[in-house]
C-alpha cells in the first residue's frame, strides 16, 4: 500500500527563483504571474481503487494571510484544465489579520472516489499578504 499522507507542492516564482515548495510565501507568485496557485496533483482513493473514498485536507496559514483556499478533484486519469471541479465543503476564506494572532489550521473531510486531488490558493493581491505554510493531504 502506498504512503497515504503527504503535503501538496506548488510551483513558485519570485524575482530571484523558481522552485517547488510546500509553502507559499507572500513574495511568491504563480508561474502565470498571478496570485492564483494550483498544487501539483496527488493521487486520490479512486486511483488505487479504494472503496471508502475518505480524504482529509488541512490548510495552515500565518495570521496575516488573506485569500481563499479550497480543494479540487477529478475523475479523469489524465486530466485537462476543464476536468477539475471544486470539492464541496473544502473552502476556507481568510481575512488579514486573523485574531488571535496565531497560526491557523483548518481541516476538512470529504468523500469521493477521486482519481486526482489538488489544492488551490487564491491569494489576495493586497500586500503584505502572509504565508500559506503547508496544505496536508491524507487518503
Image: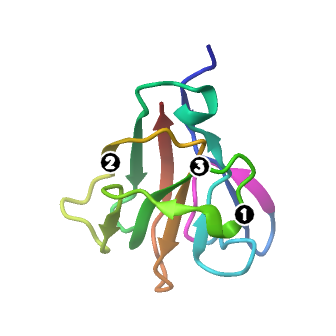
State how far apart marks 3 and 2 are (Cα).
Answer: 28 Å
Residue with the mark numbered 1: 80
Assess whether residue 21 is covered by the magenta stretch. yes
Residue with the mark numbered 2: 105
Counting from the top left corner in percent of width and height, residue 77 is at 71, 46
**Which region of the structure is painted magenta?**
18-26
Nearer to us: label 2 or label 1: 1
Residue with the mark numbered 3: 75
Q: Are marks 1 and 3 in contact (CB under 8 Å)?
A: no
Q: Earlier in the sequence, mark 3 or mark 2?
A: 3
**Is 136 above or below relative to 40?**
above
**Is 125 above or below relative to 136?**
below
Counting from the top left corner in percent of width and height, residue 42 is at 63, 42
Q: Which residue sits at x=64%, y=70%?
A: 82
Counting from the top left corner in percent of width and height, residue 127 is at 49, 82
**For the residue carrying disc 3, how many other residues have a C-alpha within 10 Å: few (<14), some (14-19), or many (20+)?**
some
**Quadrant of the image containing the N terminus:** top right
Front one among 49 and 132: 49
Counting from the top left corner in percent of width and height, residue 66 is at 39, 73
Q: Earlier in the sequence, mark 2 or mark 1?
A: 1
Q: Which residue sits at x=18%, y=59%?
A: 100
Q: Secondary structure at mark 3?
A: loop
Q: Secondary structure at mark 2?
A: strand
Q: Which residue sits at x=63%, y=55%?
A: 39
Q: Earlier in the sequence, mark 1 or mark 3?
A: 3
Amino acid at each position: 500500500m502506498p504512503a497515504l499522507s503527504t503535503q501538496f507542492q506548488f510551483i513558485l516564482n519570485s524575482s530571484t527563483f523558481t522552485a517547488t515548495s510546500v509553502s507559499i510565501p507572500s513574495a511568491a507568485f504563480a508561474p502565470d504571474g498571478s496570485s492564483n496557485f494550483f498544487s501539483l496533483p496527488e493521487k486520490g482513493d479512486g486511483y488505487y481503487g479504494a472503496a471508502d473514498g475518505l480524504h482529509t485536507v488541512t490548510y495552515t496559514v500565518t495570521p496575516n494571510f488573506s485569500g481563499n483556499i479550497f480543494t479540487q478533484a477529478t475523475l479523469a486519469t489524465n486530466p485537462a484544465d476543464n476536468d477539475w471541479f471544486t470539492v464541496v465543503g473544502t473552502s476556507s476564506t481568510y481575512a488579514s489579520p486573523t485574531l488571535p494572532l496565531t497560526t491557523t489550521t483548518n481541516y476538512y473531510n470529504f468523500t469521493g472516489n477521486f482519481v486526482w486531488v489538488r489544492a488551490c490558493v487564491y491569494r489576495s493581491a493586497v500586500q503584505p499578504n502572509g504565508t500559506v505554510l503547508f496544505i496536508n493531504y491524507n487518503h
